[in-house]
Amino acid sequence: MSPRHPDPCYEEPCFPKARPGKQRPHFPKPLITVDGIPRVALNPGDFASLHQRAYDLRPEWFEGFQLNTFKTLTVHRIIWASWNLSHITPTGFRLGAQVQRKCSDTVLKTPVVAFDLNPGTLASNLFLLYRPVASICSEISIQLKPQTQSSPVIDRLSLQHTGTSTTTTLRCYNPTRQSCRMTLDHLVSYNDRLAFGAELLYEWYRDTTNAQMAIAARYTGDKYSLAITGSKEAFDLSYWRKVNNQLQIGSSLACSHREGKAIGTIYYLMERPDCTIRGLFDSDWSVGFTYQRKLSQMPIGTGISLLFCIPKNTFQCGFKIDLDSNLL
């Protein structure tokens, strides 16, 4: 044992000490050992939203002139009205509202009822979302046409079960006595990044039936997402990436064996404090963008939509004004 140094403030040098009879130095073992912390698999969301991050970048086209007004009565009651002048979509007024229960922090309480009405024809759309328990959610979308005295048309009816790392959804589209289209899908999270699942489709029209099965997977990173869906008649591939706080890009490839056609599209989204730009261009030679801007110190927003298709030699242009008190 080496003698102790007389100076109490003296510190020995931090060098490895050689063992007796050996030339190689000996390094001490670590003081503590830390195991990796496993991440719990999150809920993967809906099967229909696998490509949602890329498709959210798509512009919302409008043509002609639109004047939209929004008014928030309370936190959970909103009304709106719109006036549209166009030669593609129906021209006229639309009135709508959305009513829901109060929100508790970030939890949305149901039921949620939303509808819009055409005062001239009294044709309306009704949407209802209800969650009786935390894991069960039901939705219904109905079209009403009072002038024709026809029965209501159910656009979509769905029932969804949400678990810790799974989501199961049953949907029914346009159910009638002669035709219907139903899907049953199940999506599972393997971990916090990888999710995969399958969907069963069954449809019939009079005496003709069709049944198919599709499989899908999605890998999500911190700033990117890759999703793929494939079946016997179709194939979809999408990629989304966040370049920075102002720019997002995405791409998709959709192939249809029934139509014998494949289209590749590139999307982009640029967000600034006072404006938002969305655009796309695809392999079918369609190019367009939408530009939305908020006027400073005023509850007014403006928007421009431009779409040009070279093979069809068509051009669409739209301009809209949004009056919203929430923009203040």
Image (spheres, rainbow, N blue to C red):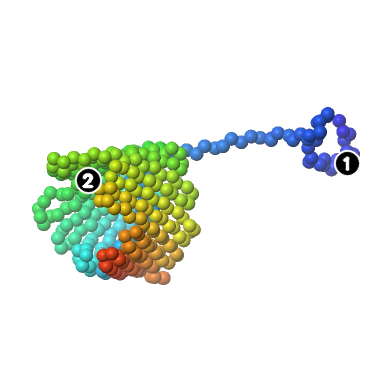
Examine the image and state in which quarter residue 231 appears.
top left
Are the two marked residues, 2 and 1, in contact with CB atoms closer than 8 angstroms?
no
Q: CA distance from mark 2 to mark 1?
A: 87 Å
Count of number-bearing discs: 2
State which quarter of the image contains the C terminus: bottom left
Judged left or right of residue 263, residue 248 is right
Task: Name the residue type under label 2.
Answer: Tyr
Tag shown at residue 173: 2
Helix, strand, or loop for circle 2? strand
Which amino acid is tagged 1? Asp
Residue furthest to the left: 149
Residue drawn at the location 48% of the way across and 51% of the way down? 223
Q: Determine if residue 328 is in view.
A: no
In the rendering, at what x and y percent does residue 135 appear?
34, 38
* Quadrant of the frame with the N terminus: top right
Vertical arrangement, residue 45 with respect to residue 266, above or below:
above
User: In the visual, does 322 lie left or right of 174?
Assistant: right
Near mark 2 (Cα within 10 A), the count class, few <14, some 14-19 or many ≥20, is: some
Q: Which residue is mark 1?
A: 7
* First-in-chain label (2 vs 1): 1
The numbered disc on residue 191 is none
Mark whose residue sits in front, 2 or 1: 2
Camera sees residue 124: yes
Q: Secondary structure at mark 1?
A: loop
